[in-house]
Structure formats: structure tokens, C-alpha cells
């Protein structure tokens, strides 16, 4: 017989044709998986299936003997394609019966429908699998169901996230075996370099696992508790952050924009943006942060050369001699933004996002950046990969990175903090 795993295994199944057809993104699967991991389960799979009773039954028949807990979300509503109840009953070899208490509680929902047929469909939600414990909805009308079987537990939860979350808490109760993950966020280094640094910092540590998540220009390190506990996880996070050095801009899960806004607010500095190729994405990232008004003065989207000249003060001579995508234009944009916005620090972006507009001298992906501070203004060029969205996203991250670097420099000094 195989040895019992250190943690009970779990699987997550999200049901909905809208998910498997790409009409909507799945948010339940990752959220449920994270919650189960924090509760001490080893989540082995997150699976999406359409509203197909045969497919759901087949999945559950295979999965029930393999996992201590299976959580299913979706397919518990009143419509014709809500087939999770029937599929789960079939997989367990049990029957469905109407619960009298649920029938009564659904009365007001039935009364809101104009036809008897529509009202009758609402009552489908009172069908309960034999032996199930009912999770009474606090929002919505679909109840959850918890079923114990010979191999473990099967939980059926509604699909809408605001209905699912309270029932997930009911299911797990106060179970909290593992410490919450620690998130270290980094910028400016490839994921392979980050991985090597973290491996070195964690050498000799036991009971701690980590995952590397890379996106455009950013790398997150997720430290997970594998039995070490809160204190050991904190120690590991501090060691990893120290090894990462300036590459690590956040140890509490804050985003890059959040880190920038808070740092500027602490120093009493106002930020500004002048954007061409990013079209306001840098300003949008900053204003997504609650409380950004304490640090963000404003932004100018200067796409046309005429706007660069009229609002930011970029001279026609500069544009004619060097072009819109140049160090000289980027510098003039950043300095112009500082002046017209009354900002202490301003960042500028101007480039060629593609797919058209490139040339041998300035191919698609060429982006010039400039950062203007009370002490100096400097520009740098980067060649960014990807399609139009990819170039713009990477340019936004790079511009935010320049703001972060400037905020790490004492006012009036060119030295690093």
C-alpha cells in the first residue's frame, strides 16, 4: 500500500460551458485552490468542464477514490444546463429528493416569476442528494451540498463567487494548518536568475516550497508552508528578500504601482506621466491604487506630435531632427510633464508598439523612456519583445520601474538610497 501523503489531497472542479468555451475566465478554481492549500490540503488538480452531465459524472467517478476532498463549483442553479446535482448523484450511486425546508424557502423566488414553468424550474434547487448536509445560501438561492463517502468528502458549491465564498468558509470552518503564503515581488531580472537566488537563500531549509510566477517584466516568488510554520516561513522570506536585494520591491504582496504610490506619498513627492506609445497605461496603473491622489499629480497622453509640442513643450526642431521616438523627445516630454503638471518626478514613454511603423533604424519594440527629477533628467532605450499589447505592457512596467528607481534615490542626489 502506498504511504499516506503528508497532507490530504484535494481536487477542484469548476463547471460551466462559458468557462470551457472561453466566454468567461475562471476565477473560482484558483481561489478555491488557494483556500484549500491554506487549510492544509495538497491540491492536485483544478479542472474545468462544460455543463455536461456525462463529463461531470465521469470525472467524479475517477476522482472520488483518489482525493480526500473534492470541491465542485457551478451547475447548481435552476436552468436546464445546471446538471451538477444529477451528475454527482450518479457518480455516488445515490438518489435525489426534494427537501421540504428548501421548497418553502424558495417560495419568494418562485413568486417573482411570471410563468408557472419558470417557477417550477426554480424549485429544482431544492433537490438534494441522499445523505447530503445542506449549506444554506446567504446570498442567492442555490444551496450547497456536502457529502461524505467511503473515500472522503464531496462538496458542491454554487458558481457565482459571492455565493460560493461563504459556503467554502462553512465547509472548511476554522481549519487552518498551513501559514498563508509569503509573496516577494521583483523587477529587472529574468525568472531563472530569481530562482537561483531564492534557491541559494533557502538552501538547508525544510518544510518550505516556492513557486516562480513570471509576467511581462516582473517575477513573483511565492513561498508556501509545507509544514515549517509561520516563524520559519517568515525567516525564509527575509532570507530570500535579502538575497534578492534591490530586485525585490515588495515583501507584503503589494503591486509595483502600490509600492510606488506609497513611497511617493511617504516622501511627499508628486508624480506625473507623459505617454505616447503606452497611451495612458502608466497613469492608469498608478490611479488603480487606492489613495493615489496623495502622490499622483496627473498625466498627459501625447500621441500626436502636435500634442507633444502644444502641451509638453517638445520643440518642432527636436521632433524634426530626432523624431518622436528618440532620447531627445523623451527627455523633453518628461521635463515638460514636470513643468505643466507641477510634478516632482515625471516619466515619459515614446516608442513603436507595432505591428506597423517600424524601420531598420527603429524596429517595432523600440521604446525610449525618460525620467525627470529635481536633480537630473536621463533617458534610456529598450527593445521590447511581443505583439502590440506585449510591447505596451512591458513598456508600462519599465516606466514604473524607472519611477521606483527615482524614488529610491534621495531628493537632490544622484546616489542610490
Image (cartoon, rainbow, N blue to C red):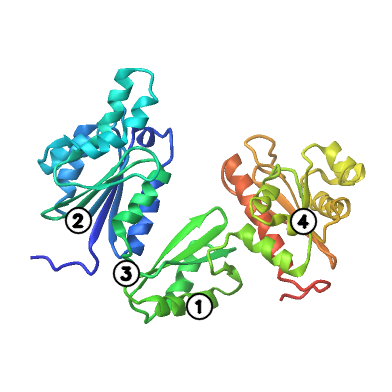
- Where is mark 1, residue-wise? 238
- Where is mark 3, residue-wise? 177
State which mark lies toward you, 4 or 2.
2
Sequence order check, earlier mark of 3 and 1: 3
Q: CA distance from mark 4 to mark 3?
A: 48 Å
Sequence order check, earlier mark of 4 and 2: 2
Q: Quick one: SS at disc 3? A: loop
Pointer 1 local density, CA inside 10 Å: few below 14, some 14–19, many at least 20: some
Residue 110 visible somewhere in the drawing = yes
Q: Quadrant of the C terminus?
A: bottom right
Label tally: 4
State which mark lies toward you, 4 or 3.
3
Q: CA distance from mark 1 to mark 2?
A: 34 Å
Q: CA distance from mark 3 to mark 2?
A: 18 Å
Sequence order check, earlier mark of 3 and 2: 2
Pointer 4 local density, CA inside 10 Å: few below 14, some 14–19, many at least 20: many
- Where is mark 2, residue-wise? 67
Sequence order check, earlier mark of 4 and 1: 1
Amino acid at each position: 500500500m502506498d504511504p499516506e501523503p503528508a497532507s490530504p489531497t484535494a481536487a477542484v472542479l469548476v463547471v460551466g460551458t462559458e468557462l470551457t468555451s472561453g466566454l468567461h475566465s475562471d476565477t473560482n478554481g484558483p481561489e478555491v485552490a488557494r483556500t484549500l492549500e491554506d487549510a492544509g490540503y495538497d491540491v492536485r488538480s483544478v479542472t474545468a468542464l462544460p455543463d455536461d452531465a456525462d463529463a461531470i459524472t465521469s470525472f467524479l467517478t475517477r476522482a472520488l477514490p483518489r482525493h480526500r476532498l473534492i470541491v465542485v463549483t457551478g451547475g447548481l442553479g435552476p436552468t436546464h444546463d445546471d446538471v451538477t446535482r444529477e451528475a454527482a448523484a450518479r457518480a455516488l450511486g445515490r438518489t435525489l429528493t426534494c427537501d421540504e425546508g428548501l421548497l418553502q424557502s424558495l417560495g419568494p423566488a418562485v413568486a417573482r416569476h411570471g410563468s408557472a414553468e419558470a417557477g417550477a424550474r426554480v424549485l429544482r434547487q431544492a433537490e438534494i442528494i441522499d445523505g447530503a448536509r445542506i449549506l444554506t445560501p446567504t446570498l442567492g438561492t442555490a444551496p450547497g451540498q456536502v457529502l461524505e463517502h467511503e473515500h472522503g468528502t464531496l462538496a458542491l458549491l454554487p458558481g457565482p463567487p459571492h455565493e460560493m465564498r461563504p459556503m467554502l468558509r462553512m465547509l472548511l470552518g476554522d481549519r487552518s494548518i498551513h501559514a498563508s503564503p509569503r509573496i516577494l515581488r521583483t523587477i529587472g531580472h529574468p525568472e531563472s536568475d530569481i530562482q537561483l537566488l531564492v534557491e541559494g537563500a533557502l538552501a538547508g531549509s525544510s518544510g518550505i516550497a516556492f513557486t516562480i510566477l513570471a509576467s511581462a517584466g516582473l517575477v513573483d516568488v511565492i513561498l508556501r508552508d509545507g509544514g515549517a510554520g509561520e516563524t520559519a516561513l517568515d525567516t525564509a522570506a527575509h532570507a530570500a528578500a535579502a538575497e534578492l536585494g534591490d530586485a525585490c520591491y515588495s515583501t507584503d504582496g503589494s503591486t509595483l504601482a502600490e509600492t510606488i504610490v506609497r513611497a511617493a506619498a511617504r516622501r511627499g513627492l508628486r508624480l506625473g506621466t507623459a505617454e505616447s506609445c503606452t497611451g495612458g497605461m502608466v497613469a492608469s496603473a498608478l490611479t488603480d491604487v487606492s489613495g493615489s491622489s496623495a502622490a499622483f499629480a496627473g498625466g498627459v497622453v501625447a500621441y500626436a506630435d502636435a500634442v507633444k509640442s502644444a502641451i509638453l513643450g517638445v520643440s518642432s526642431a527636436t521632433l524634426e531632427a530626432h523624431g518622436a521616438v528618440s532620447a531627445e523627445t523623451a527627455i523633453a516630454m518628461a521635463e515638460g510633464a514636470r513643468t505643466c503638471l507641477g510634478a516632482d518626478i515625471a516619466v515619459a514613454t515614446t516608442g513603436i508598439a507595432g505591428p506597423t511603423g517600424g524601420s531598420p533604424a527603429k524596429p517595432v519594440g523600440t521604446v525610449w523612456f525618460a525620467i525627470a527629477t529635481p536633480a537630473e533628467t536621463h533617458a534610456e532605450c529598450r527593445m521590447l519583445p511581443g505583439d502590440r499589447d506585449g510591447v505596451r505592457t512591458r513598456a508600462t512596467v519599465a516606466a514604473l520601474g524607472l519611477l521606483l528607481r527615482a524614488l529610491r534615490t534621495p531628493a537632490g542626489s544622484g546616489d542610490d538610497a
